[in-house]
Image (cartoon, helix red, strand yellow):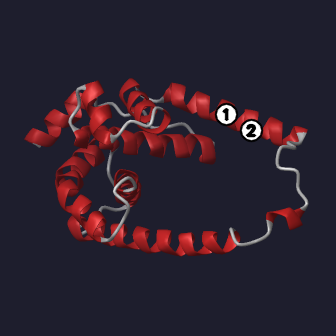
Amino acid sequence: MFITSDLDRWFAREILVHEAALTRYLQRARQRPTDVPDLRQEIYVRVYESAAKAPPISPRAFLFQTARNLIIDRARRERIVSIDYTQDLDSLNVLIDEISPEQRLSARQELKRLSTALDQLSDDCRSVIWLRRVEGLSQKEAAARLSLPEGTLESHLCRGIRALMKMVLGGGTPDRPQATARGLHNESKHG
């Protein structure tokens, strides 16, 4: 089992070095070009979380197997969603604009949990998540705005999303990453 800083160094050394090959693999797998960065990020999150429990014996093979499994899962989901869209929505007799007081309260509570979780992230992780997920910047645009290498930006996004999921869904507190963006980049170059 890794300590967070060791896991970050391992991730940069063993996984992020394959980013170009992973991107080509996702493009060859006929993924929409606009989906590739998000798909790649989801793969990174899964690999990071799995490695936190037990590091894989062959990191590159594990990365590409995770990518393959995620592509298959997405294809299955898309087929299921397309079936749902064929139903006649009028026959459900539901007012779409009607929100119950319980739903409104639940949404406010979820928003409060998310806001609290965002406040507890490191400045680097919060900035990266804001630019990528809220402002919708591409990976390249966000990296340029923050003056970070793209690999470091992805690492921050991965850790930030993992921490948010833990806080919002699990009710815990995030592990505050100790390494700064520039520190992690330097560690990946030298370590």
Q: Is residue 38 left or right of residue 105?
A: left
Residue 28 seen by the camera: yes
Q: Quadrant of the C terminus?
A: top left
Residue 177 % position (x, y)? 37, 34
Residue 63 seen by the camera: no
Q: Amino acid at mark 2?
A: Ala
Q: Residue at x 25, y 67 (%)?
A: 25
Q: Quadrant of the N terminus?
A: bottom left
Q: Cβ–Cβ below 8 Å for labels 2 and 1? A: yes
> Looking at the rendering, which quadrant does residue 6 occupy?
top left
In this rendered view, identify the residue nearer to me: 166 or 68: 68
> Looking at the rendering, which quadrant does residue 50 occupy?
bottom left
Residue 29 % position (x, y)? 32, 71
Q: Is residue 6 left or right of residue 168?
A: left
Q: Amino acid at mark 1?
A: Leu
Mark 2 and mark 1: Cα distance apart in space: 6 Å
Q: Identify whether 172 is placed above or below 125.
A: below
> Looking at the rendering, which quadrant does residue 160 occupy?
top left
Q: What is the tally of numbered marks visible in this picture?
A: 2
Tag 2 secondary structure: helix
What crowding class fits label 2: few (fewer than 14 Cα within 10 Å), some (14-19), or many (20 or more)?
few
- The residue indicated by pointer 1 is 111
In this rendered view, identify the residue nearer to me: 123 or 77: 77
Q: Which mark is residue 107?
A: 2
Looking at the image, which residue sits at the far left? 190
Q: Identify whether 3 is placed above or below 185.
A: below
In this rendered view, identify the residue nearer to me: 64 or 26: 26
Q: Which mark is residue 71?
A: none
Residue 45 % position (x, y)? 40, 53
Tag 1 secondary structure: helix
